[in-house]
Amino acid sequence: MKSIFAVVALLALATARPAHHARQAPATTPLNDLIKAKGKLYFGTATDFLDTTGERTDTTYQEILNTTSEFGAQTPGNAMKYDTTEPTQGQFNYAPGQQVLDYAAANGQLVRCHNLIWHQQLPSWLTSRTWTSADNATLQGIMKNHITSLITHYADACYAWDVVNEPLVDGTGALQSSPWLDAIGPEYFPLAFKFASDAAAQVKAATGKDIKLYVNEYNDEYAGTKTTALLNLVQSVQAREIRIDGVGFESHFIVGQTPDRATQAAAKKQFADLGLDVAVTELDVRFSSLPPTSAGLAQQATDYVNSVGSCLDVEKCVGVTVWDFEDKYSWIPSTFSGQGEADLYSDDYSAKPAVAAIQELLAG
Ligand SMILES: *[C@@H]1O[C@H](CO)[C@@H](O)[C@H](O)[C@H]1NC(C)=O
Ligand SMILES: *[C@@H]1O[C@H](CO)[C@@H](O)[C@H](O)[C@H]1NC(C)=O
């Protein structure tokens, strides 16, 4: 039951908001303050500050993004991916990622740095040729240089790194084919964490700060072949006495098809029981057909609450990140034709029912 104290606290938070942050409906929903009061580290969002994206020049977007009571963490959607950070072998482009880090630092926000090793968004110098086991040592060198360079460069500005992103195939739970798998074989996965933990140890020696090292995956939010394969993968790293700190549950869901709260909590708990942190890392809940009905929006609110609630249910769940908060900048419409409205705010910046529902969950 929602107490009167929670309501009073919310009003106090709303009044404390500086004037330039005043805006319509969501002014009373400081999600980050609420989730921190529940013992979590952050409520965060993905963002992109590339030259090609509108976020940089959209002041309404930025007013919400830079409100730390709403979002206590950022994840760069694309700015730190391989094709951006190492477009030419051995020549690093740190600037786009640095913009996100600087912006977050100015607001006192954490950054989940994303990501180091993935089979997608690779530069052409890696994808334009075939790699075989004859290239094992070469690819290990390339992987090590990329991981070490990014981790040591951005250093303690990263709260966490997604070291390996989406390693597994849906359905089968096999490792995704990639230059890393082609040349190094399955051993690439623990090796990536070995290189990352060595680099993180350098950062720790220089700054005293520990960076959390994550594997990030989707369709691991419920029991199944892929989730079991991920458990085995994590244990293969631990069996080699290599550090792995956390598992990301991307949580890209569909309205009405989102796993319930207990199911999502149970999946997280399996990894927490291995001693790992867990986090909801890319939450959005899309409509498979548009426009949404009011019943659909209510269902979407329930779906969001189930996911955020599952994080509350698992002590080692550190926080929740939405995969951007504003429909205008959602990846969904360009990836899933005819689908969308997956984010917390409509493209006119009005808050969807999901915002109030999450606020009520967190204030309860
Ligand atoms: C937040 O963004 C708005 C819009 O760009 C800007 O006017 C304001 O100065 C920013 N505030 C902070 C604390 O960065
Ligand atoms: C690549 O080398 C590593 C040792 O550095 C080894 O564990 C792995 O099995 C090798 N992979 C292949 C495909 O030979």
Image (spheres, rainbow, N blue to C red):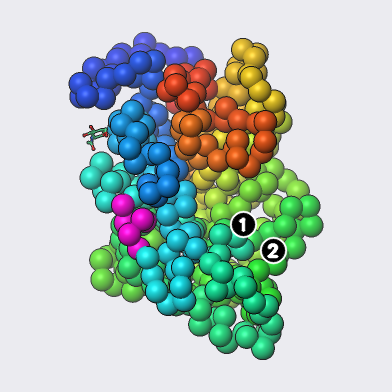
Kindly give the residue lying farthest to the right in the view shown.
172
State which region is magenta.
Answer: 94-99
Residue 212 placement: quadrant: bottom left
- Looking at numbered disc 1 in the image, what kind of residue is underneath it? Glu
Image quarter where the C terminus lies is top left
**Predominant secondary structure in magenta?**
helix
Find residue 188 and report its horizontal and vertical position in percent.
Answer: 61, 74
Q: Is residue 125 visible?
A: yes
- Please name the residue shown 57% across and 73% down the image: 126
Find residue 336 and report its horizontal and vertical position in percent.
Answer: 66, 38
Which of the marked residues, 1 or 2, is nearer the chain's N terminus? Answer: 1
At label 2, counting other C-alpha atoms closer than 10 Å, the crowd grade (few under 14, some 14-19, many 20 or more) is: some
Q: Nearer the viewer, residue 152 or 259?
A: 152
- Looking at numbered disc 2 in the image, what kind of residue is underneath it? Gln
Q: Is residue 36 visible?
A: no
Q: Nearer the viewer, residue 341 or 247?
A: 341
Residue hosting label 1: 166
Residue hosting label 2: 176
Q: Nearer the viewer, residue 221 or 314?
A: 221
Q: Residues at badges 1 and 2 in contact (C-beta under 8 Å)?
A: yes
Whether the magenta-drawn stretch holds residue 97 is answered as: yes
Disc on res. 320:
none
- Please name the residue shown 31% across and 52% down the image: 99
